[in-house]
Every structure is written in structure tokens, then in C-alpha cells.
């Protein structure tokens, strides 16, 4: 059962066990069994080791930004293509919302280069944030979209409409003066 933290469902160890041991196809099952046989480690031990290595690499690795961006792009792009191929529009909407939130975040992220010298865990936090955005357990992109982005765009649309009507009124007044 997922842990709830700040109103979010956070996957727990038992969720990881369930995920790692549920069937995912012959190739996955063979690879996991070979890993367990060759290393003497259980799947969850290997997964935690991989998480630790990834975390350390994101702090000290030369290509940490690339790895971080790969995590933010690779699975979401794959899932987006799969969603487009289905007849359901719900999954299309989910991934369109992800890419919208990702785009807003990328604009903010552009200005964070200076943070790396002060906060070396930045890419670890960024990866966790990107996972929060797209994991189905958290649906972070949907939350941020409905809470912040959609209302901001609604206000921007109102402002644009107001500017357009004000400009139209000014144009009409100018044309009346010419006559």
C-alpha cells in the first residue's frame, strides 16, 4: 500500500517488489533470472543498488545533465507514441499535459545553471521531480497543470482578449477620425 506524503501517494518497498516480480514478458523474466543467478542478488537489491549508483552519478557524473534529461524524455516520449496509437483520448491527454508542464518547467530550468555550484543534488531533485510528473502513482503533471498552468493560461487568454478589444476600439476610433 503506497505511503501518503503531502497528499501524494509515494510508492513503498512493497510496491517495488510487486512491480519487479509481476510478469513483463519473456525477455524481462529471463534477464531478471539471469541477473539473480549471476550476482546472487534479489531483484529488489539490484534495483536499490542501481538507484544508489544513479543517484551518485547524478551528483558527480560528467554527463549528469544528459542522464537527467534522458529520464525526462525517453519514457515519456515512448509512452506518448504508445498513447497516440490507442483509440482512447485519455492517455493522449495525460501525455499532452505532461509535455505542457515539462515545457513550463524547461523554461524555468534554463535559468538554473548557477544552482549547480551551490546545490550539487540538483539533478537528483530534478529526476525525482520528473518522475513525480509522469508516474501514474503520483500524476504530478495533472496536479500542476490544473492547479497552476491552466489558470495562468486562462488569465493570459483574458488579457489577450482585452488587448485585442482595446486595440480594435482604438483602430475604430482612428478610422472614424479619418472620415
Image (cartoon, rainbow, N blue to C red):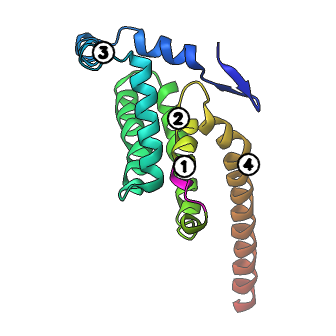
Q: Tell me the SS state at disc 1.
A: helix
The circle drawn on residue 151 is 4
The residue identified by callout 2 is 134
Q: Tell me the SS state at disc 4.
A: helix
**Mark 2 or 1, which is nearer the eye?**
1
Please give the name of the residue rendered at 64% of the width and 12% of the height, measured from the top-left corner: 1
Label 1 or label 3, whichever comes before in sequence order: 3
The residue identified by callout 3 is 36
- Residue 32's image quarter? top left
Instruction: Specify the quadrant that holds the C terminus.
Output: bottom right
Label 3 or label 4, whichever comes before in sequence order: 3
The circle drawn on residue 91 is none
Please give the name of the residue rendered at 68% of the width and 46% of the height, measured from the top-left corner: 150
- Residue 76's image quarter? top left
Q: Distance between the residues labelled 4 and 2?
A: 21 Å
Label 4 or label 1, whichever comes before in sequence order: 1
The circle drawn on residue 126 is 1
Please give the name of the residue rendered at 49% of the width and 11% of the height, measured from the top-left corner: 18
Closest to the observer, 173 or 18 = 18
Amino acid at each position: 500500500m503506497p505511503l501518503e506524503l503531502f497528499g501524494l501517494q509515494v510508492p513503498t518497498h512493497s510496491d517495488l517488489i510487486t512491480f519487479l516480480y509481476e510478469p513483463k514478458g519473456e525477455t524481462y523474466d529471463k534477464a531478471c533470472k539471469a541477473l539473480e543467478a549471476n550476482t546472487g542478488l534479489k531483484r529488489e537489491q539490484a534495483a536499490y543498488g542501481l538507484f544508489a549508483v544513479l543517484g551518485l552519478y547524478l551528483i558527480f557524473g560528467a554527463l549528469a545533465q544528459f542522464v537527467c534529461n534522458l529520464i525526462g524524455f525517453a519514457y515519456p516520449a515512448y509512452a506518448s507514441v504508445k498513447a497516440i496509437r490507442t483509440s482512447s483520448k485519455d492517455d493522449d491527454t495525460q501525455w499532452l499535459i505532461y509535455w505542457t508542464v515539462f515545457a513550463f518547467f524547461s523554461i524555468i530550468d534554463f535559468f538554473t545553471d548557477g544552482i549547480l555550484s551551490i546545490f550539487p543534488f540538483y539533478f537528483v531533485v530534478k529526476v525525482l521531480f520528473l518522475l513525480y510528473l509522469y508516474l501514474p502513482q503520483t500524476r504530478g503533471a495533472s496536479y500542476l497543470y490544473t492547479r497552476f498552468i491552466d489558470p495562468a493560461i486562462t488569465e493570459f487568454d483574458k488579457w489577450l482578449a482585452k488587448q485585442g478589444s482595446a486595440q480594435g476600439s482604438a483602430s475604430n476610433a482612428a478610422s472614424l477620425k479619418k472620415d
